[in-house]
Amino acid sequence: MNRIRLAREDEAPQLHALLQRAYASLLKHNIHFTITRASVEDVLAVIRRESTFVLETERGLTATITVRMPWLAAENDPARWPFIHWFAVDETAKAQGYGSQIIRYAEEDFLRDTLKSPAVYLATAIRHPWLTSLYEQRGYQPFHYRVNPLGVELVYMKKDFKLAVNSFTPSQPSPDLCVKRARSGGLA
């Protein structure tokens, strides 16, 4: 049975290995993200600071997504919404729906429905052969461009959530009831 939960600190080595396997294919395209040079200690620091979710299957840790909250944003971050930091599916488990499952959880269950966030954003390499179009299919729209510290051109993409309008409307007493209460000395 698949289960999505927060990563535990003792899983930092496993999570580091999963991220390294998942991001390794990007190096062939000369795409470098900070995770490709991160240590287990760096992953542990992110687990402690950000909301790091894992998808656990019969294979073990199969996918992960990390959400950085706006109050942790750097001065030069282009937006003040939650940011999808790391998103990865183990190389041995790609194209089986695990990525869709964990990103849907982060976007809908966690950010939209629980935290009531109006939007989320992420960044991906412009040169990546298919990620920009995948995110566009998920409702993300480009809004900013930048080069990361490792020299990779990034596109920042935002997804607006259609938050349910609060359907609670305080009941208003009928005008007749207000008049009756006023005449009897009660509150209208």
Image (cartoon, rainbow, N blue to C red):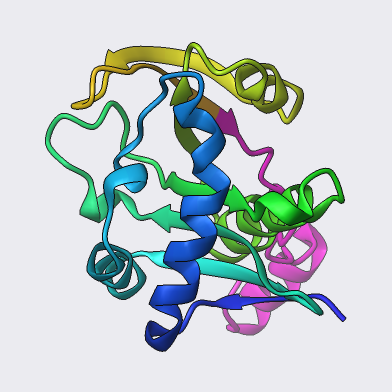
The residue located at (71%, 59%) in the rendering is 169
Residue 108 placement, left or right of 150: right
Asked whether the viewer can see residue 91, the reply is yes
The N terminus - image quarter? bottom right
Tell me: residue 185, above or below residue 171.
Answer: below
Q: Is residue 169 magenta?
A: yes
Q: Is residue 185 magenta?
A: yes
The residue located at (57%, 78%) in the rendering is 187
Report the number of discs: 0
Asked whether the viewer can see residue 104, the reply is no
The image shows residue 182 at horizontal and vertical percentages of 62, 73
The C terminus - image quarter? bottom right
Residue lying farthest to the bottom in this orientation? 10
The residue located at (39%, 41%) in the rendering is 81
What span is colored magenta in the figure?
159-188
Tell me: residue 101, above or below residue 157.
Answer: below
The image shows residue 121 at horizontal and vertical percentages of 47, 35
Q: Nearer the viewer, residue 83 or 166?
A: 83
User: Which quadrant would residue 32 be assigned to in this image?
Assistant: top left
The image shows residue 78 at horizontal and vertical percentages of 28, 26
